[in-house]
Amino acid sequence: MLGVMVMRGSTFDNVSNLPEGVLTHLRDCYEGTRLGRQELCAELLEEVQGALWTAKMIDAARVRIAPELQRVVVAVDPSGTAGGGAGDDVGILVAGLGIDGRGYVLSDYSCNLSPDGWAPRVVDAYARFAAALTIYCAMGLNNHLYAAKPRTDKIWSKAGSTFRKVERSLAT
């Protein structure tokens, strides 16, 4: 990018400006740790520790166009919070099973909204991708989706370790 200069420097490059004993303390606390690599050695760590998939793995599996799909679902992981930055994001993904037997993530509708905000996003994703609707929910938030009137009667709800199919007529 024009007009931008990136400068990198480790804590060790700045040792002459640190109070006596600080470097020893920082080494004792962080040397040999992931946080130490980042904060002491100025190493840019882009991968999330403990993640199931790395960015490199995801990039290697990307396709421009998914094959013909057998089924498309909208999966929802509600946060159970009021949204608006006050809590975790609501995970909303559209995924499909290809005729090749592989799964494809088609779109990410995740957000940090209240149920009144995220439910219409789920309905939009459902309509846009002509999907079946799958919800993983332990908080009774299905009512928000029914209020938003998705055109489906296939909602799977998870409460604890038990799945149950919820059938309702949602004709508008």
Image (cartoon, rainbow, N blue to C red):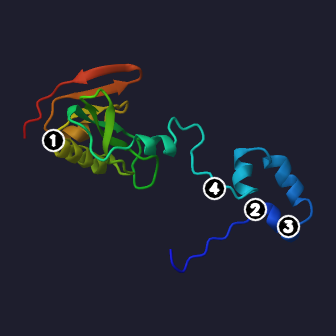
Say which label, 2 or 3, has the lower sequence index: 2
Where is residue 100 drawn, in percent x and y? 28, 28
Provide the secondary structure element on which disc 1 rests: loop
Residue found 30% across the figure and 26% down from its top = 101
Q: Nearer the viewer, residue 71 or 18?
A: 71
Specify the amino acid type for callout 2.
Ser
Asked if residue 70 lies left or right of residue 22, the reply is: left
Mark sitting earlier along the chain (3/4) = 3
Q: Which residue is mark 1?
A: 149
Label 2, label 3: how many angstroms apart (C-alpha)?
Answer: 12 Å
Q: Which residue is drawn at the image coordinates 27% and 45% (left, top)?
A: 65
Estimate how packed mark 1 is, as few (under 14), some (14 to 19) or many (20 or more) residues with alpha carbons within 10 Å. Answer: some
> Looking at the image, is mark 2 or mark 1 nearer the viewer?
2
Q: Quadrant of residue 72?
A: top left
Q: Secondary structure at mark 4?
A: loop
Amino acid at dot 4: Leu
Q: State the residue at coordinates (78%, 62%).
A: 11
Q: Which of the two marks, 3 or 1, is nearer to us in this view?
A: 3
- Does residue 24 lie above or below 4 as drawn? above
Q: Earlier in the sequence, mark 2 or mark 1?
A: 2
Q: Which mark is residue 44?
A: 4
For mark 3, does the 10 Å Cα neighbourhood hold few (<14), some (14 to 19), or many (20 or more) residues?
few
- Is residue 115 shown above or below 69? below
How many labels sit on residues? 4
Residue bearing mark 3: 18
Q: Report the mark closest to the observer, 2 or 3.
A: 2
Check disc 2 and report its element: helix, strand or loop.
Answer: loop
Residue assigned mark 2: 10
Which one is earlier in the sequence, the residue at label 2 or at label 4? 2
Q: Are marks 1 and 4 in contact (CB under 8 Å)?
A: no
Dividing the picture into quadrants, the one containing residue 18 is: bottom right
